[in-house]
Image (tube, helix red, strand yellow):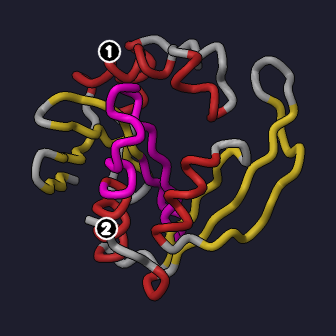
Amino acid sequence: MYLSNGNMVIRNATASDAPQLCLWWNDGEVMAHAGFPLGTGQTEEAIAASLAGDSDQTHRRLIIELAGVPVGEMNYRNKGNAAEIGIKICDRAQQNRGYGKKLLSMLIGELFKMGYGKIILDTNFENKRARHVYERLGFKQRRLNVNAGRNQLGVLQSFVDYELVPGDFCDFA
């Protein structure tokens, strides 16, 4: 996948992105909302090997670039008629600037063009910023999973399941 809009690019992650992904995934501040306040502990080699298994038919990790500089990542996973997605703007200087909404619009629009009938995701209940963006895009809350898991430190976490169908999509790309 390669999508662009102005200075924003979403592209397939490759083995050459493993060092950057390793830095982000092992940064507890970046990964805390995903339940990894100590980071994931993955190596560059393991990440590169994992990326080799990506395909458009199963799942794909994507790199977000602004003006040619990697600033975050996205992903999607084929769940039959649905695509499950995720996003992280990892460069703190690029957070809260409206990029997430535009980048998600680009990805969601492409996934609907690829034939997916709905987009699904979950997010930590405490991630109010992300929940606001998802709801602005038209996602509907389907379930609140209270105390459904624990993070690496053993703290109980609650999650919100969201779903988006084409008729509810508010495209901000």
The residue beneath circle 1 is: 19
Q: Which residues are magenta?
A: 75-102
Question: In the image shown, does 66 or 114 lie closer to the viewer?
Answer: 66
* 147 or 49: nearer the viewer: 147
Residue at image x 60%, y 55%?
A: 131
* Residue beneath the point at 18% across and 46% down: 9
Residue at 43%, 83% (x, y): give it: 166
User: Which residue is found at the position 75% from the left and 50% from the top?
Assistant: 159
Residue 81 in view in this figure: no
Q: Residue 153 vs residue 51: left or right?
A: right
Magenta stretch holds residue 90: yes
* Residue 82 drawn above or below residue 87: below
Image vertical order of residue 131 relative to residue 148, above or below: below
Please check the rendered image and state whether residue 167 is part of the magenta-colored stretch, yes or no: no
The Cα–Cα distance between marks 1 and 2, rounded to whole angstroms, is: 31 Å
Residue type (three-letter) at the residue carrying disc 1: Pro
Amino acid identity at mark 2:
Phe
Quadrant for the C terminus in the image? bottom left
Vertical placement of 105 versus 47: above or below? below
Residue 130 lies, in percent from the top left, at 55, 49
Q: Give the label on residue 35, or none.
A: none
The quarter of the displayed image where residue 127 is located: top right
Neighbourhood count class around disc 1 (C-alpha, 10 Å): few under 14, some 14–19, many 20 upward: some
Label 2: which secondary element: loop
Tell me which numbered mark, 1 or 2, is placed earlier along the sequence.
1
Residue, disc 2: 172
Left or right: 114, with 127 as reference point: left
| Dot 2 crowding, Cα within 10 Å, few <14, some 14–19, many 20+ | some
Q: Nearer the viewer, residue 88 or 41?
A: 88
Give x and y (percent) for residue 60. Answer: 38, 47
